[in-house]
């Protein structure tokens, strides 16, 4: 497959702003391109690169033939084009999902469970290819991408099991001739809108519980990373999940979103993405009073107390801050360090960050890939500049990486203050801002001083303190002496403006169920 460039002149990629001219292209950059090209060619020939949407079980182009490019953020090359769909295609996808709901919701839980289990098995059987596809379109290191495939698949396995445990209730009646029941039933057609940072897991966290309950879905993946979503949807069909149960549309986000919101047939919107878009969707869902789950931005505090185990705190901070190059909503956004351990911790973190290998996700030993696009790098740059202008110091990094394009140096900053923009906004990049605090009360006040409330981390060896601080934190998820907290068996979600609802665990099922109370009378 011929690869072309996203930026600049198609026929002359040399003119792209971040490309080194071919004649003087570094050996490393050339290797990066070759590796990505051969992976893309292999995935294409083995049918893993799907470049059409999926409506009612049929692979479909945009009705007006328009397409959008999907690019590799590490090299800028076009991987393929996908349809630029809008309201019409979305309405057809909704109609297919609505038709399929009739039979899918009537299957036994055991039958739905078998389909989900097959889907899980197929994803796991192809985890290498799916991981490669993810690295190609999203940029994360291959090992991390394959890890996401296993993590994403775990939601399908878990909900294949949980499908059989959607229990109702029998309530002791208040009158002798009555019998009172609670039935749990699927809400209906679900619109699932997902971001680019976890191209598979954000989909499976929504679609697996929805399908387990008997719902059908219209997925709108991010236009930046639709290929993993399409490959996963293809495997759902191979697993025997009937046509129309899983539909995928992509293209004009606003038109697709509006169609999902306007439809009376869509009974639930589940979204992961920015707080701004989440608020729009919540407002839009009001017109038809849909159920809404939102997993929005975070501003995670990572609190290191004087009594922390330095090694544990360092490992946890590196894991939560630098995973996916800092592009996750549970990434530590502010590292609050108590004054007694501040110097030691700052030195240890700086030397660990200094040695991180940055590069194309296919490169040997690479732990930091590119950021998703130039807008992401510009945001990081402006937050770092704002902090420097207000007195923060760069200990490591602090600028674009020599590799060019959207690579940014893993960064540690000291003397950061709570009022700087870097402490107020989600950085979504590989920058660890260190803020010094004196007392536990001050740490709690600083940590809660934000509209966000998704994840928080604390590092301490004092058990009483770990409980006290955990209870005081206004966050939906708290990691104590641990930086990696996400798992399919635990509820994931935020408080305050970080969202509504929970994904994963038994609680994740409730988001896709209606509760129906049944009163049987005249039972004497
Ligand atoms: P991010 O900054 O992570 O890209 P966004 O909230 O912009 O977060 O995007 C998350 C998802 O929401 C993507 O699939 C995007 O296309 C989609 N999206 C963006 N704007 C809208 C909208 N107005 N209606 C529906 N979906 C939208």
Image (cartoon, rainbow, N blue to C red):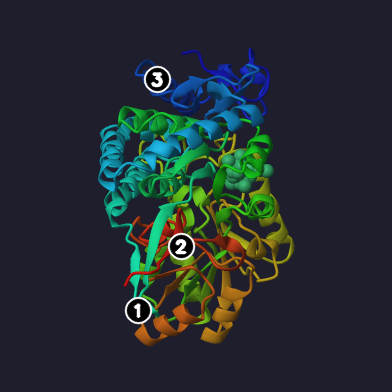
Query: Which numbered disc flags the more N-terminal residue, 3 or 2?
Result: 3
Give the residue drawn at x 54%, y 32%.
95
Question: Label 2, on which residue?
Answer: 349
Relative to 342, does residue 348 appear above or below in the rendering? above
Task: Give the x, y percent position of residue 479.
Answer: 41, 68
The answer for how far apart the CA atoms under marks 1 and 3 are is 73 Å
Q: Residue at x 33, y 44 (%)?
A: 153
Number of labels in the image equals 3
Q: Can residue 408 be seen?
A: no
Quadrant where the C terminus lies?
A: bottom left
The percent coordinates of residue 237 (x first, y second) are 36, 29
Q: CA distance from mark 3 to mark 2?
A: 36 Å
In this image, 122 relative to 1: left or right?
left
Packing grade of label 1 (10 A; few <14, some 14-19, many >=20) is: few
Where, by quadrant of the figure, is residue 262 drawn?
A: top right
SS category of the residue bearing label 2: helix
Q: Quadrant of ligand 1?
A: top right
Residue in view at x 57 percent, y 61 percent: 499
What residue sits right under mark 3 in the picture? 38
Mark 3: which secondary structure? helix
Residue located 51% across and 85% down the image:
440
Mark 1 against mark 3, which lies toward the viewer? 1
| Residue topped by disc 1 | 176
Query: In the depicted view, which residue is nearer to us: 388 or 467?
Result: 467
Q: Is residue 503 left or right of residue 376?
A: left
Instruction: Choose top left, top right, bottom left or bottom right for residue 156.
Output: top left
Specify which label sits upstream in the sequence, 1 or 3.
3
| Helix, strand or loop at mark 1 | loop
């Amino acid at each position: 497959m011929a690869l072309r460039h996203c930026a600049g002149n198609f026929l002359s990629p040399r003119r792209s702003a971040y490309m080194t001219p071919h004649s003087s292209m570094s050996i490393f950059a050339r290797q990066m391109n070759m590796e990505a090209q051969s992976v893309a060619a292999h995935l294409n020939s083995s049918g893993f690169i799907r470049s059409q949407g999926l409506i009612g079980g049929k692979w479909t182009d945009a009705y007006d033939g328009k397409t959008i490019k999907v690019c590799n953020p590490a090299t800028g090359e076009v991987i393929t084009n996908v349809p630029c769909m809008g309201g019409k295609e979305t309405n057809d996808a909704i109609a297919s999902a609505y038709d399929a709901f009739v039979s899918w919701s009537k299957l036994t839980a055991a039958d739905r469970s078998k389909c989900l289990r097959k889907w899980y098995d197929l994803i796991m059987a192809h985890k290498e290819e799916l991981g490669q596809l993810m690295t190609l379109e999203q940029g994360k290191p291959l090992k991390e991408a394959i890890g996401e495939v296993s993590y994403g698949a775990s939601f399908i396995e878990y909900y294949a099991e949980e499908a059989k445990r959607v229990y109702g209730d029998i309530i002791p009646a208040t009158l002798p001739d009555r019998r009172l029941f609670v039935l749990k039933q699927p809400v209906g057609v679900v619109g699932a809108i997902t971001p680019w940072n976890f191209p598979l897991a954000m989909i499976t966290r929504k679609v697996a519980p929805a399908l387990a309950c008997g719902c059908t879905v219209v997925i709108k993946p991010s236009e930046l990373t639709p290929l993993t979503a399409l490959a996963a949807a293809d495997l759902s069909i191979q697993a025997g999940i009937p046509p129309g149960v899983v539909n995928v549309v992509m293209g004009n986000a606003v038109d697709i979103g509006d169609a999902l919101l306007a439809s009376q047939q869509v009974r639930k919107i589940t979204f992961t993405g920015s707080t701004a878009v989440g608020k729009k969707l919540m407002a839009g869902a009001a017109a038809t009073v849909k159920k809404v789950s939102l997993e929005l931005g975070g501003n995670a505090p990572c609190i290191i107390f004087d009594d922390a185990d330095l090694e544990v705190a360092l490992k946890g901070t590196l894991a939560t801050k630098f995973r996916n190059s800092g592009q996750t909503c549970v990434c530590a956004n502010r590292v609050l360090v108590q004054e007694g351990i501040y110097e030691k911790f700052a030195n240890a973190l700086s030397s660990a960050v200094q040695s991180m290998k940055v590069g194309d996700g296919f490169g040997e030993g690479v732990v930091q890939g590119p950021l998703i696009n130039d807008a992401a790098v510009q945001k990081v740059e402006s937050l770092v500049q704002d902090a420097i202008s207000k007195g923060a110091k760069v200990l490591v990094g602090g600028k674009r990486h020599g590799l060019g394009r959207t690579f940014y140096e893993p960064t540690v900053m000291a003397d950061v203050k709570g009022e700087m923009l870097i402490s107020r906004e989600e950085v979504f990049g590989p920058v660890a801002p260190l803020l010094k605090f004196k007392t536990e009360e001050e740490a709690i006040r600083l940590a809660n001083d934000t509209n966000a409330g998704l994840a928080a981390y604390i590092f301490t060896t004092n058990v009483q303190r770990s409980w006290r601080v955990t209870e005081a934190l206004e966050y939906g998820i708290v990691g104590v002496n641990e930086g990696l907290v996400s798992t399919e068996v635990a509820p994931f979600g935020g408080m305050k403006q970080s969202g509504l609802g929970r994904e994963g665990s038994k609680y994740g099922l409730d988001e896709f169920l209606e509760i129906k109370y049944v009163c049987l009378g005249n039972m004497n």
